[in-house]
Amino acid sequence: MIWILVVVFVLGLVLRFPIAFALGLSCLVYVLFAGIPLIIIPMKMYSGIDVFVLLSVPGFIMAGNLMNHGGLTEKIITFCNHLLGHVRGGLSLVNIGASMLFAGISGTAISDTASMGSVMIPAMKKEGYDSGFSCAVTAASSTVGPIIPPSVPMIIAATLSGLSVGKLFLAGALPGLMLGVGLMFVAYFISKKRKYPKHKKSGFKQIALGFVDTFWSLLMTFIILYGIIGGIFTPTEASIVAVMYALVIGKFVYKKLNFKNIQVVVLDSMKTSASLMILVGFANLFGYILITEQIPQSISSEILGFTTNKYMVLLLINMLLIVVGTFMETIAALLILFPILLKVALAVDVDPIHFAVIAVLNLIIGLTTPPVGVCLFVASSIGKIPIGEVSKAGFPFLLVSLLVLILVTLFPVLSLWLPNLFMD
């Protein structure tokens, strides 16, 4: 019976149905063919979203939207320009640096590509950067946010596994920093080779004033992390603090928020949150069917039957997740595959915190992997160029991302050092 589920799901993806609809339709067809009472659908959907930690997701999504509309993101970009604009290809470094500071609060790499790309791609093209390079940098830089805390994919991974959100946030910090620095190195090397423009160096006074102007934007991430790690508030409470903070700063400090755009923010956040929760609900139903058909046990047996070497198992999982991440959005892939593959990783003594970082890193790299990486499509649509051109320009960035993935996979200390230091 499992073939019915798989065929309908793949057919939905081929026909470009939204992931949630493809999952829901495949589950419905399976339930009808298997003769299972339809009441199981709302029951499993509700149990999937009835998780306290998931309450933080709408909060962080709304906080990211308030940052965009309230001028906080703009201040971050300006500050990065003061710091890095004088370097050859400085605007590409600003693109990456701003994504690191923005830290994925908007929700996912795809939304980061859209929000940053709408500002940075036209600006880079105007200053003489190649369209392909501008789009490739934006797509690659958007993958840094979901690793550096606070991170919505990490919250999803914690929900699925029962791991500490604070530990997962800390575990992603160093790999995220490595990824961002690596992308900056590639961007600088290419910019120097192609003689891309650079700005006049900002003086100390300009940098200091820029920092003061950006201070309130930067403080938001610090408050969230310190609050969660220090045990002052839960991730759910942190998301509400983030919303209130972004609202106050955007309204009374930067004075960019008004009643009209707050309405837009609330509506957009509701739409995004609702679609995400529907996705979580259908994914839980999908997972229930997989467990009923004993698919996790079969996958685990196949992998462990092939090899029980820890690093060979991780290599196979890495290959699978990168391919899946190329075709599927990060959170959807996590919801379906993470619980299954976590059991395999635990069977070969991989630390669950370490594996969560590997899984998220894999899936976000998949978003920039040709030929159908979703972030590549978003960037190419903003830059109005063929996706093939973006894919070609993004190949050096993809190689660096894969190198970081290999290092994180081989050396668990890169993801476990900070959680062990601060939370044990």
Image: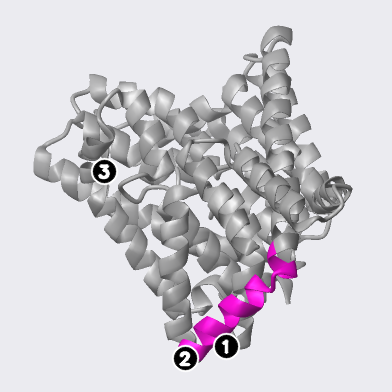
- The prevailing secondary structure element of the residues shown in magenta is helix
Residue 23 position in % (x across, y down): 64, 46
Number of marks in picture: 3
The alpha-carbon separation of the residues under discs 1 and 2 comes to: 7 Å
Q: Is residue 205 visible?
A: no
What residue is drawn where x is 68% and y is 40%?
Answer: 276
Question: Mark 1 = which residue?
Answer: 348
Give the magenta range.
Answer: 290-306
Question: Mark 2 = which residue?
Answer: 309
Residue 397 position in % (x across, y down): 29, 52
100 sits to left or right of 6: left
Q: Is residue 355 above or below residue 60?
A: below
What residue is drawn where x is 39% and y is 45%?
Answer: 373
Q: Is residue 290 above or below residue 303?
A: above
Three-letter code for the amino acid on which mark 3 is drawn:
Ser
Question: Mark 3 = which residue?
Answer: 391
The quadrant where residue 249 appears: top right
